[in-house]
Image: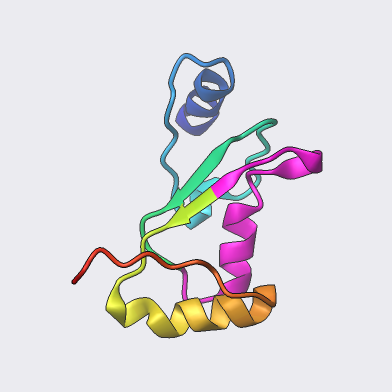
Amino acid sequence: MARQNALDDFKNSKIKVLIATDITARGIDIDDLPHVVNYELPNIPETYVHRIGRTGRAGMEGTAISFCDTDERLDLKNIQKLLGFTVPVRSFYK
């Protein structure tokens, strides 16, 4: 019940940010979702594609932003392999 209430509040713009785990994100269908932010990369590339598929649906534009720690570099490489292109990376370390 709480999950559905939160989802309804998000869809009706009563709340602006929705935070979900992989489990709670399953089955979420939101039209015109402009952004998906991944705090951690999943270790299964298909899960990443499922996550970012929440934005940019039906010809709409969307942006996926993912934080990637150095210990997740192999996960990033596997995601890029599945996607068939290199995901732009911006390092915040000098």
Q: Quadrant of residue 74?
A: bottom left
Q: Residue at x 57, y 55 (%)?
A: 51
Location of residue 11 in the rendering, given as x and y in whole percent from the top left corner = 59, 22
Between 64 and 25, which is closer to the camera in this rendering? 64
Q: How many marks?
A: 0
Q: Is residue 27 left or right of residue 17?
A: right
Q: Is residue 59 above or below residue 53?
A: above
Residue 51 part of the magenta segment: yes
- Quadrant containing the C terminus in the rendered view: bottom left
Identify the image quadrant of residue 45: bottom right
In the depicted view, which residue is nearer to us: 71 or 88? Answer: 88
Q: Is residue 91 left or right of residue 24?
A: left
**Residue in the foreground of this view, choosing between 58 and 61:** 61
Residue 15 lies, with reference to residue 82, above or below; the image says above
Q: Residue furthest front?
A: 94
Display coloring: rainbow
Where is residue 21? Give x, y as percent: 44, 52
What residue span does the magenta drawing correspond to? 42-63
Q: Residue at x 58, y 75 (%)?
A: 86
Whole-percent x, y for residue 3 in the image: 49, 33
Residue drawn at x 47%, y 14% as measured from the top left: 14
Q: At 56% across and 64% down in the image, what residue appears?
A: 48
Figure check: 10 above or below 23:
above
Name the residue at the left extreme.
94
